[in-house]
Image: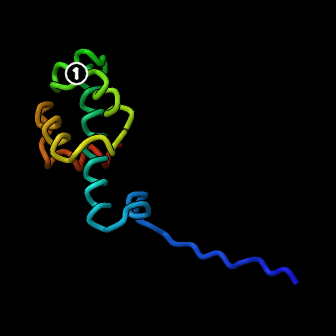
Amino acid sequence: MNEQPKSSSITYASVWDAISSSPEEAEEMKQRSALMIAIAQKLEEDGLVCLPRAAVLLGESEQRVSELLLGKVGLFSLSQLSSMAALLGLERASLSDRVKDA
């Protein structure tokens, strides 16, 4: 008799909850990804998706801006992303609204 193993399914609120080693790490990753989304949206809205212009504005290399736009969350600290958001005039209060609309 071949019995198939029972599968158990766990539901997570977000992918970060599923892959992070702690609730604190998951929360930080959520914040970092939200900031990245808001920054990318703001760059697009302001017509700054051209890497050289965005790089100058953010004080980063074109490669770093490219990595940001590609969503490479692990390459940016919360502090770095907060600084970039501030350079673009994004305020903390408006960030959650921007991400909800995404």
At 36% from the left edge and 39% from the top edge, which residue is drawn? 72
Q: Position of residue 25 (x, y in %)?
A: 29, 61
Picture layout, residue 1 above or below residue 79? below
Task: Indicate the position of residue 97 as horizontal and vertical percent values.
Answer: 24, 47
Instruction: Pick the quarter of the image with the C terminus.
Output: top left
Quadrant into which the N terminus falls? bottom right
Q: Name the one closer to the observer, 100 or 75.
A: 75
Q: Residue furthest bottom?
A: 1
Q: How is the image coloured?
A: rainbow
74 on left or right of 85: right
Q: What residue appears at the point 32 percent right and 61 percent down from the top-left corner? A: 26
Q: Residue at x 30, y 68 (%)?
A: 23
Q: Secondary structure at mark 1?
A: helix
Q: Say what amino acid the circle numbered 1 marks.
A: Ala
The residue sitting at 34% across, 31% down in the picture is 67
Q: Is residue 50 above or below residue 90?
A: above
Q: Residues within 10 Å of mark 1 (few under 14, many from 20)?
A: some
Q: Where residue 46 appears, x then y in whole percent? A: 23, 23
* 8 versus 22 height, above or below: below
Q: Would residue 53 appear left or right of 8 to someone viewing this image?
A: left
Furthest residue toward right: 1
Residue bearing the label numbered 1: 55
Q: Position of residue 20 (x, y in %)?
A: 37, 61
